[in-house]
Amino acid sequence: MAQKVVVIGGVALGPKAACRCLRLAPDTELTLVDENTFISYGGCGLPYYVSGEIQALDALRSTNYQVVRDPEFFARMKGFKVLNQTRAIAIDRAKKTVQIRNLVTQSEEYLPYDKLVLATGARPRVPNVEGHDLGNVFTLTKLEDAQSIRQACENGSVTEAVIVGGGFIGLESAVALADMWGVKVTVLEMDDYLMRNVLPESLGLMAENDLVQHNVTVCKQEKLLKIEGKNGKVNRVVTNKQTLAAQLVILAAGFIPNGQLAAQAGLETIGNGAIKVDAFMRTSDPDIYAGGDCCATQNIITGKYGYLPLGSLSNRQGRIIGTNLAGGSDTFPGYVGTWAIKLFDLSIASTGMTINRARMEGFDAISVCAEQLDRAHFYPEKDMMCLEIVVEKGTRRVLGMQGASVNAHGLKARIDAVAACLQYAKPTVNDISNLEVGYAPPFASAMDIVNVAGNVADNVLSGRFTPISGQEFVKLWKERANNHIFFIDARPARAGKAMEEKNPDWHAIPLEEIEKHLDELPRDRQIAIICNTGLRSYETLLIMQRKGGLNNVLNSLGGMQALKQMGLDRDL
Amino acid sequence: MAQKVVVIGGVALGPKAACRCLRLAPDTELTLVDENTFISYGGCGLPYYVSGEIQALDALRSTNYQVVRDPEFFARMKGFKVLNQTRAIAIDRAKKTVQIRNLVTQSEEYLPYDKLVLATGARPRVPNVEGHDLGNVFTLTKLEDAQSIRQACENGSVTEAVIVGGGFIGLESAVALADMWGVKVTVLEMDDYLMRNVLPESLGLMAENDLVQHNVTVCKQEKLLKIEGKNGKVNRVVTNKQTLAAQLVILAAGFIPNGQLAAQAGLETIGNGAIKVDAFMRTSDPDIYAGGDCCATQNIITGKYGYLPLGSLSNRQGRIIGTNLAGGSDTFPGYVGTWAIKLFDLSIASTGMTINRARMEGFDAISVCAEQLDRAHFYPEKDMMCLEIVVEKGTRRVLGMQGASVNAHGLKARIDAVAACLQYAKPTVNDISNLEVGYAPPFASAMDIVNVAGNVADNVLSGRFTPISGQEFVKLWKERANNHIFFIDARPARAGKAMEEKNPDWHAIPLEEIEKHLDELPRDRQIAIICNTGLRSYETLLIMQRKGGLNNVLNSLGGMQALKQMGLDRDL
């Protein structure tokens, strides 16, 4: 008798698992249920439909080869039945049935299963404030949301918008509204800086600067209190600091995994409700699989269960579940946490842990940044890139890397290479210094910036110099009346001199001239050096150590380039 | 007493090792000798100086922070002495001295060393043919070569050029001459296709197609016989097939490592003369290090010693030697062989072994190709990418990956991620299917093409379908009168119909219609299917298997896109 499979959830993982299962075991009687009308769409593409870069909504529902994925498509081309507008109400694990309700007719029935797949996804976290249910207050996780937001923009009624939450969807929405529709956008972020859960401060500031330079207002440490309306539609947003006019609000305050069905059926979940799965993507009931945004998998670096709702993971996990439904025994290796986002000009990407996360997990870790051109410095086309590497002190183990660059794909190259190491090895700083990445002048420097990040970490861990971040440098500079630090700008003469003329506390001493000036440097004060990227300042510091015996020196990693990317050069 | 270090060779590895040593151990008495005038230049940038993309030769001799690296620079800023125009004649390992000769004064002396570094590089292989010493016949490994070639172009005397050798330098030179100077370039390649040592045939054909579309003539299986001249300068090149007019010839027939000094001193070398080093970059004499283009290191995949002269490896190895000279114990992990090259529009990159190489090394291997958009198919900007993955049959171990795309950095991302796996793990096909690379629609598909390459290999290894390459498909099509194969084009109707009208042996049956036509398909003939990228043809094949019981079916991997990239669509 043919195996019966029921899949609950029809966006990314569900259809993937179903299609894969049917390819390998075409006799399977598979039914997919989803409570929405539209299924199997590219949810990550929603901001690009909002912006208008993607013209038609159907583009998000189409295969690579331009066929729209509706229930009819899956029935005819893939060999399984789709019940959309149908909600799964309960799972009876003893009887192996799923109770479902047709949301149009309200009729209910029980679907028997041999194997069940939970692909129930996640729902947006909606702040429980007055007015969250007003017109033109949206979340952005469904096709219908994107359609409504774009319609509101198209009919010209939106000149000001407020985005609640400075995470992935919040920032992608901000870009979509400001870039293509010219809407005046304000992003509200409760935390100290944008994307604080997934980025170090430096890169959060770079993200902010990219937004600010494109006329998006970023309000940090600011909390939504209520949303006010007129004629049923939003017209004002009240925070703990101000009242903002707004004809559109997007609530992008994170996700809650849809683990309710699983929990009610007695399956194991983690704290936030996500369903625990093993390496085969099985829940605590071996006949029930779960994957995608509703599930918790093992973090390879910590060994602990964690939650990472990403479309890419859903797709890979879906294939594994499909294979296993068909009798295979494919495994998911766990996750390290790799992602990428494109803002206006800047792209940001990450793998593994940030310094904050590493410390929260109990690692005695440091992070250092490398700032360098992405291609050979003599090659005519090139962009700056900034990479921050997170390492455990004693073991020199690499725990993560984050980066930012205008060169989106070049950034992906560095982050993905480190991601591969984190996923399948326990890389040390030495391994990153020797990462054998592809080189030719149009692609990289001979010493690729990813290698340089390893080298900088090696030098710092070995005590060869004391680093400070760009933010720390600026703070020290602002507080110079109290800390008596001596500031050196090691850039070529012209750049530093302009600063020195503005302020005599700024000492422009180019690398080439430092030797002549060693006697003039104070021995009773700490010295902080900055240059363009952190390289000349390191060379300067070495000469000061070697020839001047000056050891109480701080090197500003990333130099003026990092300050510029963070928008902190304005504070000097 | 200060340690004495002598470094022989001043281009990439030598100065790197010297600088690193002095940073860590500033008391070292270090002398670097080099027989040329110019030292420490970016050799990989020479083609870009030839083309004029790099304006001034000094750009190749400058640091990141725009200081020219001449002997004075190293003495003053780095703390070591450079003797250029000075040749190392012999090493006396018992006395620990190097005999050197000043090439200007011809005076000789002996430099004592505690540690010696051999960074003697490689020399171009010059074909031993008549006329190889004529004027305007060059190799391209030194600054002076680049200068002479560009001068010849600038003074307008070069309208036709012949490049001997279709490897890295040959092709980069071809691009430089044709793109920027409008020279009519012919590339002579003895082998069956370009870059045969480092690429599979498919990608060699894609490289060729990119050149041909930019008016470079590529002559394969063609051998240089002699070079003829007039007034001491080349004016004709004679091959085994033709005589070509040429006012410039670049000999780019590979490299020979400069291992002579080492061999004479009794150090171990491998077959081609490269100096064997251990993980610490030490030769068979622990007081003598070697690195860069003169040395042989361990291939991580085969465990055998091999030779890979790349500027990126030199830089990384130089840092390791510098650390070890200063008393450290840094190690080089060996190489997997990662590289990248940009031609006109197309970039090509590789890591690990090609299918040819894997078979030569005794692996029972197959290779399959994946052709897909580099970004989400619904994202407005995107390019095609082709990846060929090489896997061992029984173990499913991944041995290498090669790829091509117009998106240079996107290609680097995929190849570098696999490179990292090969370097620090023994990845299987499953590991590549689950490689956790960064995703958002502007960066990748949710199922990244690198994952797809793993998936395709998995499907083929599991016997789910029989692949053929684009070249094989075209060959079968041309021989259809004899092989009686039934050809199906599964693309959307319009594309296939045009072909069918031209030739009734071509059966345009779009994926969506295959089910209706199952009864019409022949059961006594093999069937070959093609579509746009290989995805619709796979779907078609599955339906034919499942619903038609048709199992003798070949699927053309990469589809029409691969044929176009190879220029083989013209042969249909």
Image: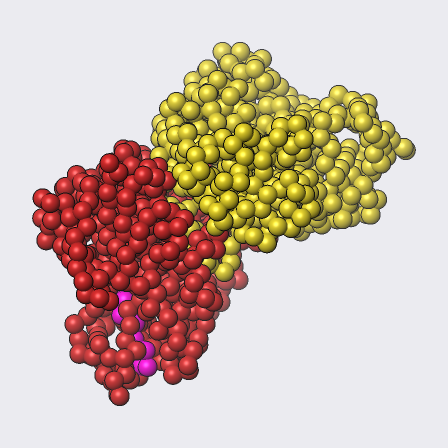
Chain colours: A yellow, B red
Q: Is residue A158 left or right of residue B452?
A: right
Q: Quadrant of residue B452?
A: top left
Q: Please state which of residues A460 and A224 is positioned toward the viewer in this rendering.
A: A460
**Image location (x, y in percent) of residue A108:** 64, 21
Tell me if residue B240 comes above or below residue A403 in the rendering.
Answer: below
**Image location (x, y in percent) of residue B485:** 31, 60
Q: Quadrant of the C terminus of chain A?
A: top right
Q: Is residue A549 left or right of residue A60?
A: left
Q: Quadrant of the N terminus of chain A?
A: top left
Q: Residue furthest front?
A: A519
Q: Is residue A479 left or right of residue A533?
A: right
The answer to if A304 sits in the magenta stretch is no
**Image location (x, y in percent) of residue A106:** 69, 24
Tell me if residue A481 comes above or below residue B119 in the rendering.
Answer: above
Residue placed at 45% from the left, 72% from the top? B180
Residue placed at 31% from the left, 66% from the top? B140
Total marks in image: 0
Instruction: Please state the extent of the stretch shown in magenta in the rendering.
Output: B246-255
**Image location (x, y in percent) of residue B483:** 27, 62
Q: Residue furthest bottom?
A: B231
Tell me if residue B523 comes above or below residue A79 in the rendering.
Answer: below
Residue placed at 15% from the left, 48% from the top? B97
Residue placed at 58% from the left, 18% from the top? A272
Q: Is residue A240 visible?
A: yes
Q: Is residue A417 visible?
A: no
Q: Please state which of residues B199 and B237 is positioned toward the viewer in this rendering.
A: B237
